[in-house]
Image: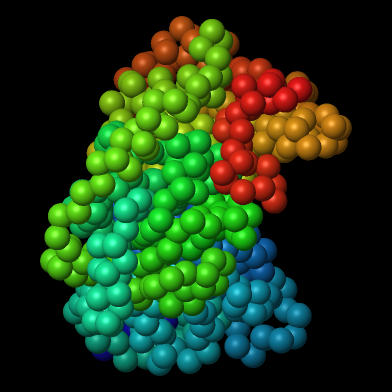
Amino acid sequence: MQLTGSEIVIECLKEQGVDTVFGYPGGAILNVYDELYKHSDEITHILTSHEQGAAHAADGYARATGKVGVCFATSGPGATNLVTGIATAYMDSIPVVAITCNVGVSLLGKDSFQEIDITGITMPITKHNYIVKDVNDLADTIRKAFVIAKRGRPGPVLIDIPKDVTANKADYERQEIKPVEPSRDLCTEDIEKALKLIKKAKRPYIFVGGGAVLSDASEELYTFAKKVDAPVTDSLMGKGAFPGDDPAYTGMLGMHGTKTSNFGVSECDLLIVVGARFSDRVTGNTKKFAKNAKILQLDVDAAEMNKNVLITEGVVGDIKVILEKLNERLDQQSHPEWMKKIMEYKEAYPLTYHKDALCGPFVVEEIYRQTKGDAIISTEVGQHQMWAAQYYKYKKPRTLLTSGGLGTMGYGLGAALGAKTGRPDKTVVNIAGDGCFRMNMNEIATATRHNIPVIQVVINNHVLGMVRQWQNLFYEQRYSATVLNDAVDFVKLSEAMGAKAVRATTQEEFKAAFKDALASGEPYVIDCQIDQDDKVWPMVAPGAAISEAFDENDVKATS
């Protein structure tokens, strides 16, 4: 049958099982929005306050559900406003399809009103992108985009459609879409080499990254860790792939990782890396990283092998499939002395904070207590992000949504809206710093407009906390452009946007406020006032080895 390009867009989204789209309309994409209006009973549209919020919401939806997130934007500034969200998804390997519309084909390249070469702009930050100049190519392009977004290492795909293509007609025939299954092809020789390394190890350590979450491999990972009989650490992106309350779990690795994990990885003789890419925030000084260990890397992307850290052996393939194969062949290992040593480290180097005042770690622990560890937590980027990673025990995958690779301030609130839309059964809490909240707090209006009951907790120290921490420790306390001590009132602003909002200055006030937020069933903002010089501990100095992690007591001892 003959359909217009805009009708084809909507029909193809329905083919893919898309139930929600996040976006913001404009002239170039008007035909698509007109068609979307006719299918509002099948596809929910969430009108965000800004296109960046739409991109982050699609990303959060994808992370929380495992499906492909979808966002819409118009041409020119509408499209460019998606760029930060697309880059965020790209750095963290999140499957998102962004659909933009452009000026008509005859107007391309003529500096037309609101024309932008969005495919040129996004080429480095997408797995693939398209501009569709012929309506006959539209349906197949959309179908390819969803496959590319999901297959192998996931990532964002952008489709740009000139406005006349959305109006032109072409033959369309509905297709039944087959789910994208992971490849089960593995190199048998690589599996054999991996097994040999594991069996020879006396002090193995397992380091888990976001790939274990994206491949839905948490069950296989748990079995593998118990068979290897090894302690487990993770990256920021790997949270929840291995249960955070398991005795073998030793906390996060890297710049703000636990001393247990940093010391243990520095002393192990085999580091098994499961779906992680050796970010500089994890490794510290790469020349000194895990220098006593052989390294076995398991990853879906061959380009990650030997990219940041030289490895001993690697297995390329889907993490779930690799772990299945290893579990089938691996006999039960036993390392009682090594495990005992790591447990002694856990006892000697617990995470600690000052418990006599309202502070970030207390807030996170109280959220964990009241949600019973069963919430989806999103974060912005900074000190609060590290406290959320350290003090909330993530028991399941897809429960921490945070910008790891790009470090995007302003990410979390949009992601929370996407997560709550995709997982309405879950409590969703966004933890932000006051600097981050300022960037996209207009999305509180989105929450109230669509009655999306997210809880927004602002850790408000009236400074850019993480930058100030560096200025305090490494820049002789020169606080250049990091003090935010002004008259902005987040409670009044949030109330003006239709949310319920309260301020907490004590532990008891926060406990009561969060209890009320959980019971309210509406968008709720809690402004938590904390000290401007609270810090994230432990820490690894820039350029140092992770074995040189230090905390507040170490600073006092060397002062």
In the image, residue 222 sits, relative to residue 25, either above or below, namely: above
The location of residue 26, given as percent across then percent down, is 58, 63
Q: Position of residue 175 (x, y in %)?
A: 22, 82
Instruction: In this rendered view, identify the residue nearer to me: 28 or 242.
Output: 242
The one of 353 and 348 positioned closer to us in this rendering: 348
> Which quadrant of the structure image shows residue 288?
bottom right
Q: How many marks?
A: 0
For this rendering, which residue is in front, 220 or 145?
A: 220
Where does residue 185 sit, x and y in percent of width and height?
A: 24, 82
414, 238: nearer the viewer: 238
Seen at 61% across and 75% down, the residue is 124
**Does residue 69 sit above or below 179 in this rendering?**
above
Residue 386: x, y in percent?
53, 37
Image quadrant occupied by the N terminus: bottom left
Q: Is 343 situated above or below 202?
A: above
Instruction: Judge left or right: residue 448 versus residue 337.
Output: right
Q: Looking at the image, which residue is at 76% across and 22% down?
A: 559
Whether residue 54 is visible here, answered yes or no, is no
Q: Is residue 75 visible?
A: yes
